[in-house]
């Protein structure tokens, strides 16, 4: 018999809403033609991987040495861990040893291993809204409870709402910068304010909540830099992947990196390695550990995403829609127009009548908004202009 809990989740209206839209898009394209369907549902990067990644793939695909496809330590190949430690040292501005890194099956695998390593049954994880919709499931996977808190009007971090949610059950706070779905990059000052309340909580209760930084979009920014957290807070962890910045989401390669200043770093890594094994990941994909270790620091051009962002903004302005200006990633978070009572699900269903597929904001804890993923062709954006206008002006 199917698990009652899983059955109820599968049958819930919000279950896999984004993936369902992606599948609907495929059906609509067959019916009307790809050029007449405007599918902005899924954050599936359409830029090709950089040449250095392609070259590394070709090189390792030809490797026929003995045991080249065999097991390695659950934490990953030492050379891959060292490469990610070098990357983390560069990003965080502090020396990070290889021992603080665990290779993971994408950022999702990294986050699940991290949460399993940290959570006791009934522990709470604070998440500022809006947030990546799968956090709910990842936290519940490991017996935790998600505690959603409001951000500022511009979707910046609000330390006061986080402080109000803290208690002795708080195990962690997850922040995602650049944020999916808002594109917001949290400032140094905002993160420092959060760190201050976490330190205050730790000193008061003896339990310092972990600050988990989910950073798969870290490299995709438009003139702003993602703040380093390791110099600010000992109990910090970065979980990330190469799905978005190197355009290899299907290869499922990422890593966990714990702050080397963390007093329990050694225990955390041991727990994360164990979690990686018993969750059934066993280890990150061997082939792509080699590819990423060789190509992670290759030059990447994200100017096309910025160009598409600007083109999409022109479309929104023409249609008369309000939006939050994204500072990174490749999502535009748009306000549901007047006359819809902030019903984002109803409005995104209405958009389907014009062959426009967008994700409802309520799936991200952002009711009254909807998300447009602009990692699509420029022609899709340009062709959608009149369809958006007609959808907004014809209820």
Image (cartoon, rainbow, N blue to C red):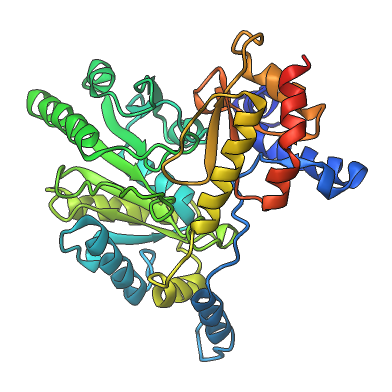
Q: Is residue 71 visible?
A: no
Using the image as rendered, state which of residue 99 and residue 332 is in the foreground: 332
Q: Quadrant of residue 355?
A: top right
Image location of residue 111, percent across then percent down: 41, 45
Viewport quadrant of the N terminus: top right
Using the image as rendered, state which of residue 365 and residue 269 is in the foreground: 365
Viewport quadrant of the C terminus: top right
| Residue at x 72% of width, y 47% of height | 380
Q: Residue furthest left?
A: 203
Image location of residue 262, percent across then percent down: 15, 49
Please indicate whether residue 72 sits to the left or right of residue 16 in the image.
left
Q: Quadrant of residue 188?
A: top left
Using the image as rendered, state which of residue 297 and residue 97 is in the foreground: 297
Vertically, is 240 above or below 5?
A: below
Q: Quadrant of residue 339?
A: top right
Vertically, is 235 above or below 196?
A: below
Q: How many marks?
A: 0
| Residue at x 29% of width, y 61% of height | 101
Vertically, is 25 above or below 345?
A: below
Q: Residue furthest bottom?
A: 65
Image location of residue 237, percent across then percent down: 27, 47
Please indicate whether residue 149 sits to the left or right of residue 384 in the image.
left
Image location of residue 364, percent across then percent down: 52, 28
Q: Is residue 364 visible?
A: yes
Using the image as rendered, state which of residue 123 and residue 314 is in the foreground: 314
């Amino acid at each position: 018999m199917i698990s009652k809990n899983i059955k109820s989740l599968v049958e819930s209206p919000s279950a896999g809403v984004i993936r369902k839209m992606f599948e609907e898009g495929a059906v609509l394209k067959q019916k009307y033609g790809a050029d007449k369907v405007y599918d902005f549902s899924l954050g599936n990067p359409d830029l090709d991987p950089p040449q250095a990644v392609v070259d590394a793939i070709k090189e390792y695909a030809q490797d026929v040495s003995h045991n080249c496809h065999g097991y390695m330590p659950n934490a990953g190949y030492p050379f891959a861990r060292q490469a990610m430690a070098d990357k983390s040292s560069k990003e965080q501005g502090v020396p990070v040893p290889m021992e603080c890194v665990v290779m993971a099956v994408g950022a999702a695998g990294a986050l699940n291993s991290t949460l399993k390593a940290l959570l006791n049954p009934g522990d709470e994880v604070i998440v500022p809204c809006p947030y990546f919709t799968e956090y709910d499931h990842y936290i519940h996977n490991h017996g935790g409870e998600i505690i959603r808190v409001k951000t500022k009007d511009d979707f910046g971090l609000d330390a006061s709402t986080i402080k109000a949610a803290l208690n002795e059950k708080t195990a962690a706070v997850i922040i995602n910068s650049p944020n999916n779905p808002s594109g917001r990059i949290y400032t140094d000052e905002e993160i420092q304010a959060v760190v201050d309340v976490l330190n205050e909580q730790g000193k008061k209760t003896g339990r310092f909540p972990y600050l988990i930084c989910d950073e798969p979009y870290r490299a995709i920014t438009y003139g702003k830099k993602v703040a380093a957290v390791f110099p600010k807070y000992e109990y910090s962890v970065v979980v990330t992947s190469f799905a978005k910045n190197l355009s290899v989401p299907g290869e499922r390669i990422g890593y966990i990196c714990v702050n080397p200043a963390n007093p329990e770093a050694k225990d955390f890594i041991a727990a994360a390695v164990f979690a990686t094994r018993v969750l059934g990941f066993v280890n990150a994909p061997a082939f792509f550990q080699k590819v990423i270790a060789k190509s992670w620091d290759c030059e990447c051009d994200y100017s096309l995403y910025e160009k598409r962002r600007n083109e999409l903004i022109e479309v929104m302005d023409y249609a008369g829609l309000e939006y939050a200006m994204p500072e990174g990633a490749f999502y535009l978070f748009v306000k549901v127009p007047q006359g819809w009572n902030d019903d984002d699900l109803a409005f995104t269903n209405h958009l389907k009548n014009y062959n426009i597929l967008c994700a409802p904001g309520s799936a991200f804890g952002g009711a009254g908004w909807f998300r447009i993923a602009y990692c699509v062709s420029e022609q899709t954006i340009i062709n959608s202009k009149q369809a958006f206008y007609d959808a907004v002006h014809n209820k």
